Amino acid sequence: MESGGRPSLCQFILLGTTSVVTAALYSVYRQKARVSQELKGAKKVHLGEDLKSILSEAPGKCVPYAVIEGAVRSVKETLNSQFVENCKGVIQSFTDVIGHYISGERPKGIQETEEMLKVGATLTGVGELVLDNNSVRLQPPKQGMQYYLSSQDFDSLLQRQESSVRLWKVLALVFGFATCATLFFILRKQYLQRQERLRLKQMQEEFQEHEAQLLSRAKPEDRESLKSACVVCLSSFKSCVFLECGHVCSCTECYRALPEPKKCPICRQAITRVIPLYNS
Ligand SMILES: [Zn+2]
Ligand SMILES: [Zn+2]
């Protein structure tokens, strides 16, 4: 991944994606944790005669967030199940299965599913409890808290909420860790590339200094031969051209000794071809 020392687009996309996913997971986790905390803090009230007196004494004749457990009773007439004898309920819904049409098979019959809230089933409600014209009513809470009406008891409801909090927490942690790891690898790569560039620059400077010293100390008749000396060993003559950069700077032996992948000692471009020079 030679990208001139800057993080590549791919790395940016990876880092961006993991950060966004982490932030999203964390916000879901925070929201779930808040709901779970509110649920724990909800006031437990018991159905009974003293409920109305408790409510009438409460400020605004309401409990903003209350848990209430009770059995289902119908207010008007009860509904009878079409399929099960002596099964009475208050909410009824039917679903026809149309899957056959979608899958292309010819239907051999229709399966009908009946769902019903049975009379006598235990229900748990969590919400705002208000005393309205001498009747107690449970309604969605005003302060953005979650409204529950469930056939589970309160403890299972709380447990389910808490296990979902744990799940989102683990997901947020996993993605948070992935984001940190990605950031760490990008920074480490940047650091190593920077170190390598500095090292090469220093080597070039040292070499130029050394060459300048040699040239200044050499007798005038030797200067020409020094200028045509290999920049690596300074003892043989330059004897090859590097392509694509076109630098003539090294002898054939030093070219062979260059570490793989071979790069021009002057400009650090990759050497794709070498053309030998013949001095006549
Ligand atoms: Zn050489
Ligand atoms: Zn070069």
Image (tube, grey):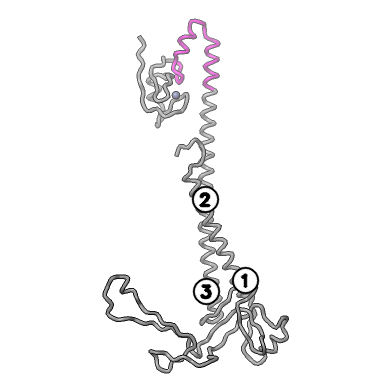
Residue 100, percent from left and from top: 31, 74
Residue occupying image coordinates x 60% and y 83%: 68
Kind of residue indicated by mark 2: Gly
SS label for mark 3: helix
Q: Residues within 10 Å of mark 1 (few under 14, many from 20)?
A: few
- Marks 2 and 1, the one that precedes in the sequence: 2
Residue 73, percent from left and from top: 53, 91
Residue in front for this viewpoint, 162 or 259: 162
- Marks 3 and 1, the one that precedes in the sequence: 1
Q: Are marks 2 and 3 in contact (CB under 8 Å)?
A: no
Residue in front for this viewpoint, 72 or 110: 110
Q: Are marks 2 and 1 in contact (CB under 8 Å)?
A: no
Q: Residues within 10 Å of mark 3 (few under 14, many from 20)?
A: some
Residue occupying image coordinates x 63% and y 91%: 48
For mark 2, what is the residue? 16
Q: Is mark 1 within 8 Å of ligand 2?
A: no
Distance CA(mark 2)–CA(mark 3): 32 Å
In magenta, the rendered stretch is: 206-234
Residue in front for this viewpoint, 119 or 191: 119
Which is in the foreground here, disc 3 or disc 1? 1
Kind of residue indicated by mark 3: Arg
For mark 1, what is the residue? 144
Q: Are marks 3 and 1 in contact (CB under 8 Å)?
A: no
**223 in magenta:** yes
Q: Is mark 3 within 8 Å of ligand 2?
A: no
SS label for mark 1: loop
Determine whether 104 is above or below 211 in the image. below
For mark 3, what is the residue? 160
SS label for mark 2: helix
Determine whether 122 is above or below 65 in the image. below
Residue in front for this viewpoint, 10 or 262: 10
